[in-house]
Amino acid sequence: DIQMTQSPSSLSASVGDRVTITCRASQGISNYLAWYQQKPGKVPKLLIYAASTLQSGVPSRFSGSASGTDFTLTISSLQPEDVATYYCQKYNSALRTFGQGTKVEIK
Amino acid sequence: EVQLVESGGGLIQPGGSLRLSCAASGFTVSSNYMSWVRQAPGKGLEWVSSIYSGGSTYYADSVKGRFTISRDNSKNTLYVQMSSLRGEDTAVYYCARGPGGGSSPLDYWGQGTLVTVSS
């Protein structure tokens, strides 16, 4: 099975900072990679799919990129409402593994 | 408007069985990819099971042989039948939709239903 490894597991940054979260697939998954945001006590929300396509309604400060089996979620200017746990998920096959999550907090 | 409403959760003893339902509105369950995803208390998201529009079903190793995903097209409802439940199955269970029939991310999620496995 393909494993999805996220890093870091948590981070603390200041409002306005650029934040980067990485997800590495143990094998190639083309661009079948999604990012989800889960705010405390809330339901997960799709942010990005196909590695870099922003879901409708998602602020443009969020972006995604891919390089081989490495995928990156970037928040260009961290806002207080971005406090959440972020998960990557592969969807290139029937086994839809999630990464372990990255908790983002405000410093 | 797309909506997913889960039900059927509750407290169940180890070894017991439970069926969760996910009533959909605003779209046709049988024309889309549907998944169950769970989240144990304080833990991350875990993909559990999926059913494709064509009817193929898939399961995580942790539930294979114990859980069965199905759908009732007449009721536009997704189900998961859970048996031989264990403490580690305690979680909030979400149903979610992947638009289209195949390789797609999960764009709509239900509010979740809590399953607690304990004696």
Image (cartoon, coloured by chain):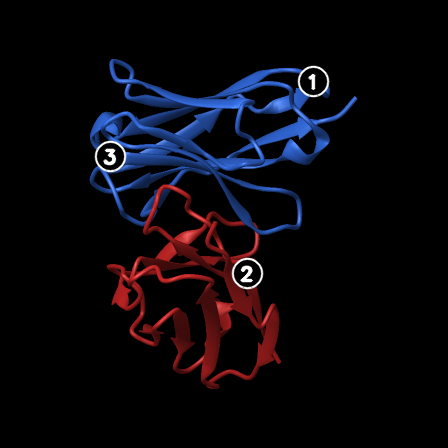
Chain colours: A red, B blue
**Chain containing mark 2:** A
Q: Which residue is mark 1?
A: B15
Q: Nearer the viewer, mark 1 or mark 2?
A: 1
Q: x, y percentage for residue B42?
A: 66, 50
Circle 3 residue: B32
Residue A72 % position (x, y): 40, 73
Disc sitting over residue B104 in the figure: none
Asked if residue A68 is positioned above or below residue B86 in the image, the reply reads: below
Left-right relation of B87 to B109: right
- As shown in the figure, which amino acid type bears the numbered disc 3? Asn
Residue A101, disc: 2
Q: Position of residue A87 (x, y in %)?
A: 48, 59
How would you rate the neighbour count of disc 1 (Cα within 10 Å): few for under 14, some for 14-19, many for 20 or more?
some
- Mark sitting earlier along the chain (1/3): 1
Say which of B53 and B42 sits in front: B53
A81 over B111 or under it: above or below: below
Amino acid at the residue labelled 2 = Gly
Q: Is residue A85 visible?
A: no
For the residue pair B103 and A16, the one nearer the viewer reads as B103
- Give SS at disc 1: loop
Chain letter of the residue carrying label 1: B
